[in-house]
Image (cartoon, grey):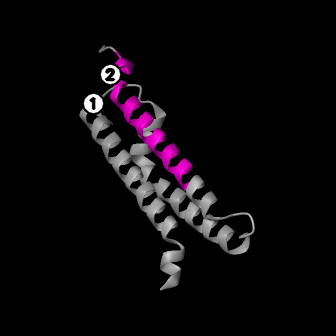
Amino acid sequence: MPIVREYAMQSIFAAAQAMVIVAGSLMTAAVLQTHGYPDAKAEWRWLPVFVREWGLALMLVPAAWVLTTLWLERHRDAWFTKRWTILSGSLLLAGLVGLMVYAYALAGSVMTQMNPPG
């Protein structure tokens, strides 16, 4: 099965990116739930709410990255090599980690956004 080995980098990075998305979505949802989302009267920040409600839709990002790198490796092999696949996969993974950590941090700081009772 040479095709499996040929595109192993895409599989590894897509799995890591998917794990980051799932873990970030679940952790953000858990923090929002502990702060009373959606029942509490608070001004919820849009990013944690988006990650909670639509975070799994971000799975389209790794899927698009895989399809794009597969196409580029097959049709543009003169300049798009495995090195670019690894670099772009690493940058996308770092970006997703940063997004999820930021959403988690914003969800945890929702208490400062709470409206006073009354």
Quadrant of the image occupied by residue 19: bottom left
Q: Mark 2 points at which residue?
A: 111
* Residue 102 falls within the magenta-colored stretch: yes
Q: Name the residue under label 1.
A: 35
CB within 8 Å, label 1 to label 2? yes
Position of residue 85 in the picture relative to residue 28 (left or right): right
Position of residue 79 measured from the top left corner of the image (x, y, whole percent): 74, 63
Q: Which quadrant is home to the C terminus?
A: top left
Mark 2 is surrounded, within 10 Å at the Cα level, by few (under 14), some (14 to 19) or many (20 or more) other residues, namely few
Position of residue 21 measured from the top left corner of the image (x, y, whole percent): 41, 51
* Residue 52 falls within the magenta-colored stretch: no
Quadrant of the image occupied by residue 33: top left
Question: SS at mark 2?
Answer: helix
Residue located 33% across and 26% down the image: 41
Mark 1 is surrounded, within 10 Å at the Cα level, by few (under 14), some (14 to 19) or many (20 or more) other residues, namely some
Q: Say what amino acid the circle numbered 1 marks.
A: His
Q: Say what amino acid the circle numbered 2 marks.
A: Met
Residue located 34% across and 49% down the image: 23
Residue at the limit of the structure toward the left, as seen here = 34
Instruction: Using the image as rendered, state which of residue 27 and residue 16 is in the foreground.
Output: 16
Mark 1 and mark 2: Cα distance apart in space: 7 Å
114 to 15, vertically: above or below = above
Position of residue 35 measured from the top left corner of the image (x, y, whole percent): 27, 30
Q: What stretch is highlighted in magenta?
A: 89-115
Question: SS at mark 1?
Answer: loop
Residue located 45% across and 50% down the image: 54
